Amino acid sequence: MTKTAVVIGATGLVGSELLTALLSCAEYSQVVAITRRALPLSHPQLTNHVIDFEKLTQYSDCLLYTSPSPRDKRQSR
């Protein structure tokens, strides 16, 4: 089974180490990095979205929006 990982903050100390680990892990076929500036590396499994965090609504194509499932709504009552 292959997985996709999304890393927000991949240019920082912890995020860059996480990114390196995910790219070397065979379980992940795709790694999406959402960053403030371009990453200094390229990899066949890596997709880098450079965004302005002050204008998040402009980037709905690369951000994931989820709504609670019906089960989540039942549990919150």
Image: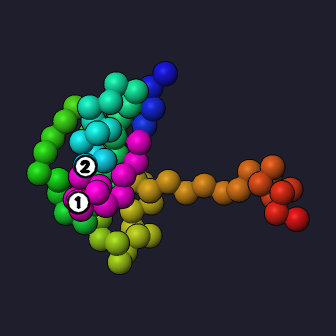
- Residue at x-position 36% and y-position 58%: 8
- In the displayed structure, 75 sits above or below 30; it is below
Answer yes or no: do the residues labelled 1 and 2 have beta carbons within 8 Å?
A: yes
Q: Is residue 4 left or right of residue 77?
A: left
The colour scheme applied to this rendered structure is: rainbow
Examine the image and state in which quarter residue 2 appears: top left
- In the displayed structure, 1 sits above or below 72; it is above
Q: Nearer the viewer, residue 63 or 10?
A: 10
Disc 2 is placed on an element classified as helix
Q: Give percent across and percent down for residue 72.
A: 77, 54
How crowded pointer 2 is (Cα within 10 Å; few <14, some 14-19, many 20+) is rated as few
Asked if residue 6 is among those painted magenta in the image, a careful observer would answer yes
Give the Cα separation between the discs numbered 1 and 2: 7 Å
Q: Amino acid at mark 1?
A: Leu
Name the residue carrying label 1: 13
Q: Give percent across and percent down for residue 73.
A: 81, 58
Q: Nearer the viewer, residue 23 or 42?
A: 23
Quarter of the image with the C terminus is: bottom right
- Residue at x-position 34% and y-position 72%: 53
Disc 1 is placed on an element classified as helix
Name the residue carrying label 2: 17
Q: Is residue 32 left or right of residue 36?
A: right
- Residue at x-position 24% and y-position 62%: 12
- In the displayed structure, 74 sits above or below 41; it is below
Q: Is residue 16 visible?
A: yes
Q: Amino acid at mark 2?
A: Glu
| Part of the protein shown in magenta | 5-16
Examine the image and state in which quarter residue 37 appears: bottom left
